[in-house]
Image: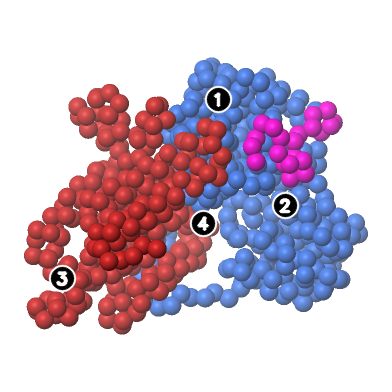
Chain colours: A blue, B red
Amino acid sequence: MLRVRLSAFLALLVLVLAACGQPAPSPAPTQAGGETPGATSAAALRVAMIIAQGGLGDQSYNDLANEGLTRAEQEFGIEAQRVESPDIVSQGEAVLRQAGTADFDVVIDLEWSTAEALTVIAPEFADTRWTFMNFPVNGDNVTSFVFAEHEGSYLAGALAALVTSDTAIPGINPEKVIGVIGGTKSTGIDKFLVGFIQGARDVDPDVEVLTSYTNDFGDAAKGQQAAEAMFEQGADIVFQVAGGAGLGVIQAAADAGVYAIGVDTDQSSIAPAAVLTSMIKRTDLAVYESVKRAIEGTLSGGETVNLDLAAGGVELGTIHPSVPQEYLDRVDELRQQIVSGQIKVWNVIEQGYPDFLSE
Amino acid sequence: MEVLHNTLVATALVSTPLLLAAMGGLINRQGGIVNIGLEANMLAGALAAVLVTWQTGNPFLGVLAAALAGTVIALPFSLVITRLGANEIIAGLGLNVLVAGLIGYLLPVALGVYGTFRPAGLQRLPRIDIPFVHDIPWIGPILSGKDPVTYLAWLLVPLIAAFLYRTTPGLRLRAAGSDLEAARAAGISAHRWRDLSTVLAGALAGIGGAQLSIGIVGLFGVGMIAGRGFIALAAFYFGAARPWPTAAAALLFGFFDAAQVRLQGQGIPVQLVQLLPYLVVVVTLTVVAITRARREGGVAVA
């Protein structure tokens, strides 16, 4: 084991050294074949999935989406290709065009920065059905999947508000203060923040929710600083919506013996003792649903599919074992109320800013 | 008052990467090269520190590896400038792009991870409590309880000042930096001294990156340097490439960075608060430029 690690490490060093005197290798776009040998291709549907920045193996967004595609392959016996590009952001349009030219039946585009390119390219390849994630893209043959992050964040806020008042739980102080740290001040991120604050307030109006932004999605030290600043003000649970900077938030919580709430995927494994729960966005479900609808003939396009709490598009991940059952029951009750429409969670994207968070 | 105290407690720690990179940059500047590639040296140092600490379990070896990584990257960069006559700005920008791109490409190949490498149970640099100082109310936590690299960084400030201004090698380095031809005429192998200054800059910036990865957060991320190499550049410009004013600038920028996260949610619009550290950089550079122009006289400030 050590030898494998060491050789990988040495290989890295050698490559770094070698590269110092040479121009950077420019890898060609790779296409990882994803045929499932032995599967009877009854549907004969040809599917391509364009991998977003971060790539396969990111233990996050792309890997989760890939799980959905793998499941669809196994269940429907389809033929699917994963299209990876070393620089999907700048090559997005070219990659989309290649996918269109290759005559796929369905192209699932995971990369959010290609939205504009998709509005141009999708009409050119009218026989291909395109799907896009996270926000709506117009087009007669484009189906968009959006997630109700505000609803999932509401449940995270509710759980945090319940836990912060219970000093019997290790690490919890008497002060009713929690926090949420966003990557940038934008509606896409504030959608999480507002849901979180609303959930906390609905459970306990006395709970104070601190907010701040790292202004960077990669700066882990900044995330850690932002979290420490909140701990100084009495916060004992901080929700991170800041990507790589958010890993600093989780680290800070682990160092201080308090809690962080993860985002997008189940981040419990990063620091099991310090992650209270995670607000999971089920990209795997969106991918699976794309294929399923294509087979059923209902992936017609010109539609936005809302993967909300009721549809299972968002959910809470692994919950810390020290959380008492009664709180879990309460959160479940709130979940039912959101699903039944009894509780309306504020959606910043659609409704603008509420009075409790400034623009 | 409490916010101020908390900010001051955090300042020393968050200033260290800036301080080390700025010290490296100033030596390089004194040696005649404006180093735009500090960001790349820091990134390489941050990664080397995590890798070696992960393999050996010893964060001090990680710091050494970071210095080495910075050196290894700095040398060819310097040679390209001194021997091949490359433009230092272009070469520096190129280095930043090259190193970031290369690491982004190699992480998945060699380690099977994308963007972030966070080995479980990674040792971090210990925190040191200074006897007596630690117990002083209010002041104690501001000065004590930091990592050894932070104390090393501050120890280096007078050492670098002494080296540059009180030793023969320091004089040679500055001579090589200020006038290539004159230095040559005096029998100094100017290029070699310039290369040495770049290598020292690489090593110091590399250690700065290590403090960020194994001193503060305990992970490596491709975006973790987040422009600190450029803030360091502003710091040694502010300090006119002299050690103490440069250190003061690094501390000032670190202070406002620590203040920024603590002032959010205090009623001031977030966007304004986030501007603060950058505003301070722009304002100080402007003030420095104006006072310098005045002192030198004759230069009209329009």
Disc 4 on helix, strand or loop? loop
> Do marks 2 and 3 both belong to one polypeptide chain?
no
- Mark with earlier residue (4, 3): 4
Asked if disc 4 and disc 3 are in contact, CB closer than 8 Å, the reply is no
Q: Disc 2 on helix, strand or loop? A: loop
Quadrant housing residue B52: bottom left
**Disc 3 designates what residue?**
B175
- Residue drawn at point x = 86 percent, y = 60 percent: A301
A96 or A46, which is in the foreground? A96
> Are the residues flagged by discs 2 and 1 from a single subunit?
yes
Q: Nearer the viewer, mark 3 or mark 1?
A: 3
Residue closest to the eye, A207 or B245: B245
Q: Are marks 2 and 1 in contact (CB under 8 Å)?
A: no
Above or below for B277 versus B181 = above
Q: Chain of mark 4?
A: B
Q: Which residue is mark 1?
A: A177
| Side (left or right) of B185 relative to B52 | left
Q: Residue at x 66, y 61 (%)?
A: A113
Front in this rendered view, residue A249 or B121: A249
Residue type at mark 2: give it. Answer: Asn
**Picture disc at residue A134:** 2
Q: Amino acid at mark 1?
A: Val
| Relative depth, front residue between A287 and A196 | A196
Measured Cα–Cα span from mark 2 to mark 4: 21 Å
As helix, strand or loop, the secondary structure at mark 1 comes to: strand
Whichever of labels 2 and 1 marks the residue nearer the N terminus, that label is: 2
**Label 1 marks which chain's residue?**
A
The answer to which image quadrant residue B143 occupies is top left
